[in-house]
Image: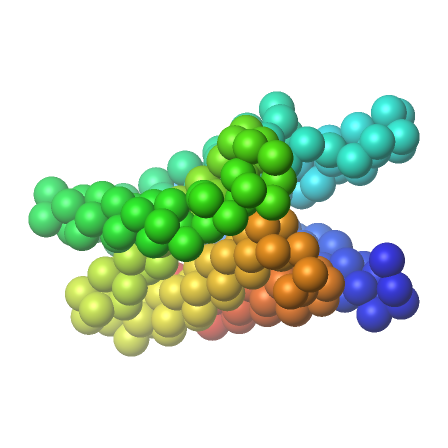
């Protein structure tokens, strides 16, 4: 790993800690919107715990973590918690919005399958579990991007609109990063990991702006 990638990863960890401090602060101070900020704080806590578990695995075993492992449970819980925050706050979304989310997941899954599956099997020797460990994330990202976009469109209060604008940007950045990560895995000669790290950093920057922008929420 070169110095640029190490610097980006260090910045990512520092931003993650900053996001956690701000989110937990909001969750503890707010009353009416505590549920929203608590779910987001728990989501980013799962992200941190997943990163810690990943580091411990690498240090203890001396080997790289598989792309599909028990550590993914932390990251999947992150998606569930963010999805719950978007679905329930400030009011519950409708069944029609749920259908939009399901449609987005199906389209993203179909696109990932069509573009990446055959090359992955050919270049990775049929390692479908390794492929699944990365391919599932763009589909999950599609769900959160859709929910954030729906929230942004239906929000009437300016305070919530600012929150959902930055949250949408955060979800979009994370989705781009995961798609680039999948591309790097399948076509390893195309990317060196730098670009997806930039978008992971942008995710936490937008999330920090989400919390800071929601002063009245």
Q: Is residue 7 left or right of residue 216?
A: right
Check the image and name the residue furthest to the front: 122
Q: Position of residue 91 (x, y in %)?
A: 21, 50
- Describe residue 125's horizontal placement relative to residue 7 as left or right: left
Name which residue lies at 79% across and 35% down.
64
- Image quarter in which the C terminus is found: bottom left
The N terminus: image quadrant:
bottom right
In the image, is residue 189 above or below residue 124?
A: below
Which residue corresponds to the image point at 73% horizontal and 33% vertical from the top-left? 65
Q: In this image, 53 relative to 7: left or right?
A: left
Residue visible at 60% across and 45% down in the picture: 123
Task: Pick whichever, 73 or 154, lies toward us.
Answer: 73
Image location (x, y in percent) of residue 58: 83, 33
Q: Nearer the viewer, residue 29 or 71?
A: 71
Q: Is residue 202 visible to the viewer in this orientation of the structure? A: yes
Q: Number of callouts in the render? A: 0
Q: Residue at x 77, y 59 (%)?
A: 9
């Amino acid at each position: 790993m070169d110095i640029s990638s190490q610097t980006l990863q260090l910045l990512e960890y520092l931003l993650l800690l900053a996001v956690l401090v701000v989110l937990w602060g909001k969750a503890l101070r707010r009353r009416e919107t505590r549920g929203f900020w608590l779910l987001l704080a728990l989501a980013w806590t799962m992200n941190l715990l997943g990163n810690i578990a990943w580091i411990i695995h690498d240090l203890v075993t001396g080997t790289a973590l598989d792309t599909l492992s028990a550590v993914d449970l932390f990251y999947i819980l992150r998606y569930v918690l963010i999805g719950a925050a978007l679905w329930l706050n400030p009011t519950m979304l409708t069944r029609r919005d749920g259908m939009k989310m399901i449609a987005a997941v199906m389209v993203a899954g179909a696109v990932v399958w069509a573009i990446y599956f055959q090359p992955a099997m050919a270049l990775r020797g049929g390692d479908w579990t390794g492929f699944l460990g990365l391919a599932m994330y763009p589909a999950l990202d599609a769900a959160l991007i859709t929910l954030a976009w729906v929230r942004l469109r239906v929000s009437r209060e300016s305070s919530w609109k600012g929150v959902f604008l930055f949250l949408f940007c955060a979800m979009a950045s994370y989705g781009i990063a995961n798609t680039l990560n999948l591309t790097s895995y399948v076509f390893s000669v195309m990317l060196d990991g730098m670009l997806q790290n930039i978008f992971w950093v942008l995710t936490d920057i937008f999330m920090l702006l989400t919390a800071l922008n929601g002063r009245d929420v």
